[in-house]
Image: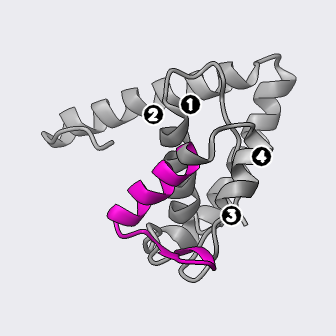
Amino acid sequence: MIEFVLNSRSRVNTYVQLIQQVKQALRVGLLTPGDQLPKVRDVAQSLAINPNTVLKAYRELEIEGLVEGRPGVGTFVRRTLADASLANQVELREELVAWVRRARAAGLAPEDVTALVETTMRAALAAEASRDGTAPAE
């Protein structure tokens, strides 16, 4: 089951952070169709947020067709965002974990690691797009 974490320093709305975390879990195969999301009340209590915030995130995911609410039972994953590349992710994830450990050992804070990954990815995608003559992927 997914465990939500909020970044209080982020400018991203709380409900959007929840949506992003569910989508990431769907992309990497941590959540699959049939899995149940945590109960609204449990998420609200563990994160000390208003239950309506969690409901808003779950509703948005439902509108996108990713989850479905079952009254009195909970919210369940309807479809995944993982694709054929999921099989390749295991090895890549292991390499990334090793890299993150090296980055942390070199003194980078988690925010520094995130910034480095995001800026490097944007630059690499932009270079790839200019080489291919296409718009950068997001």
Q: Earlier in the sequence, mark 4 or mark 1?
A: 4
Give the CA separation, mark 3 to mark 1. Answer: 32 Å
CB atoms at circles 1 and 2 under 8 Å apart?
A: yes
* Callout 3 amino acid: Lys
Q: Position of residue 11 (x, y in %)?
A: 50, 21
Q: Do tag 3 and tag 1 residues touch (Cβ < 8 Å)?
A: no
- Asked if the stretch drawn in magenta spans residue 121, the answer is no
Q: Measuring from the top left, give residue 114's x and y in whole percent.
A: 61, 28
Q: Which mark is residue 121?
A: 2
Q: Which mark is residue 117?
A: 1
**Residue under the point 82% across and 36% down:** 101
Whichever of callouts 3 and 2 sits on the residue coming sooner in the sequence is 3
Identity, as a three-letter code, of the amino acid under mark 4: Gln
Looking at this rendering, what residue extends furthest in the bottom direction?
34
Residue at left 79%, top 45%? 46
Distance in Å between CA atoms under marks 1 and 2: 6 Å
Name the residue that disc number 3 marks.
39
